[in-house]
Image: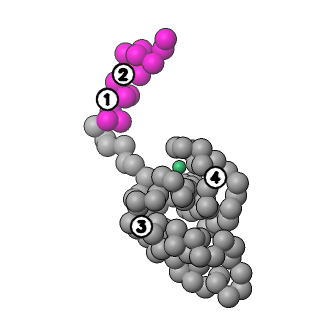
Amino acid sequence: MDIQLTPQLPCSACGTELLLSATVPHPRFRNATTTYELCPHCHADDAAAQGLLAFFALTPTVDAASSLSFARLVQEWLQQLPEPAVVSQEAFEQDVEAFHRGDFDS
Ligand SMILES: [Zn+2]
């Protein structure tokens, strides 16, 4: 797991500077990763993010004293996040048919 603190990356949705991003192994694809972003704007109402948002409100940096509670909050956050979307077999087959029809050629 690769957790980046205050990576100064913009949120992919709103452009606000992220609090952190976490790159974790993809739950279904071997050798693939998926990245979760924690944005103070987009996740303000996200129940799963409340612990971490409160942490950052009180503690802008992670130090030795706060690292344990930070690690626990990250773990809780990651466990509550939805898995990346699944492409259904039906949707996949429709795309394959469309590909063979040439729908993607233009
Ligand atoms: Zn955002």
- Residue 41 covered by magenta stretch: no
For the N terminus, give its image quadrant: bottom right
Q: Main secondary structure of the magenta part?
A: helix
Coordinates of residue 19 in the picture (x, y in percent): 61, 61
Between marks 2 and 4, how big is the CA–CA gap? 39 Å
Determine which residue is flagged by label 4: 17
Q: Are marks 3 and 1 in contact (CB under 8 Å)?
A: no
User: Residue at the left extreme?
Assistant: 90
User: Magenta residues, as a range?
Assistant: 91-106
Q: Position of residue 90 (x, y in %)?
A: 28, 37
- The dot on residue 98 is 2
Which residue bears the numbered disc 3?
Answer: 48
User: Camera-side residue: 90 or 44?
Assistant: 44
Q: Is residue 31 visible?
A: no
Whether the residues at callouts 1 and 4 have beta carbons within 8 Å, the answer is: no
Position of residue 48 in the picture relative to residue 40 (left or right): left
The amino acid pointed to by label 4 is Glu
What residue sits 41% from the left and 22% below the top?
99
Q: Earlier in the sequence, mark 1 or mark 4?
A: 4
| Mark sitting earlier along the chain (2/4) | 4
Please identify, in this view, whether the residue under mark 3 or under mark 4 is nearer the observer.
4
**Residue positioned most to the front:** 58
- How many dots with numbers? 4
Name the spot of residue 53 as percent of width and height, x first. Answer: 52, 68
- Secondary structure under the numbered disc 3 in the rendered image: helix
| Mark 3 or mark 1: whose residue is earlier in sequence | 3
Secondary structure, mark 2, is: helix
